[in-house]
Image (cartoon, rainbow, N blue to C red):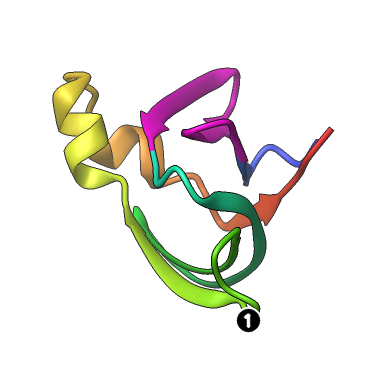
Amino acid sequence: MDDHVAILSSFDKYTTFTFRGKTLTFRTCDGLERYMKILTWDHGYIEVMAKYKHEKQEIEEYIDLDPVLKGLYMDKASFLEPIKEVRIEYA
């Protein structure tokens, strides 16, 4: 895997964001089926299209990693700075 690419995914009621062997896991909406497409990556702020169980159309969603990193006492700059791209992957 590219050393500058992070991976966004989800399972059950959780979202995962993985980069260089570290995985952030945080609660998301119960109705989320899956993330579909990354629209924008802006150093911790992600605009993404998501598919929800209760909606026929994909919905634009926003994910802010700043509060997640603060809650884990992680240094935002050192974790996010090397990330140049975010991809969606599901097993």
- Above or below residue 25? Residue 60 is below
**Badge 1: few (under 14), some or many (20 or more) residues near its Cα, within 10 Å?**
few
**Residue at 48% across, 44% down:** 82
Q: Quadrant of residue 66?
A: top left
Percent from the top left, x then y, of residue 20? Answer: 59, 25
Percent from the top left, x then y, of residue 29? Answer: 40, 47
Screen quadrant of the C terminus: top right
Magenta-colored segment: predominant secondary structure: strand
Percent from the top left, x then y, of residue 56? Answer: 65, 78
- Above or below residue 90? Residue 64 is below
Q: Quick one: 13 or 10, which is closer to the camera?
A: 13
Furthest-bottom residue in this view: 57
Residue stretch rendered in magenta on the structure:
10-27
Let me know if residue 16 is in the magenta part. yes
Q: Amino acid at mark 1?
A: Gln
Q: Is residue 72 left or right of residue 44?
A: left
**Residue at 60% across, 18% down:** 21
Mark 1, secondary structure of its residue: loop
**Residue at 56% across, 32% down:** 19
User: Can you identify the residue that label 1 sits on?
Assistant: 57
**Residue at 78% across, 40% down:** 90
Screen quadrant of the N terminus: top right
Percent from the top left, x then y, of residue 81? Answer: 39, 47
- Above or below residue 54? Residue 3 is above
Numbered-mark total: 1
Q: Is residue 64 left or right of residue 10?
A: left
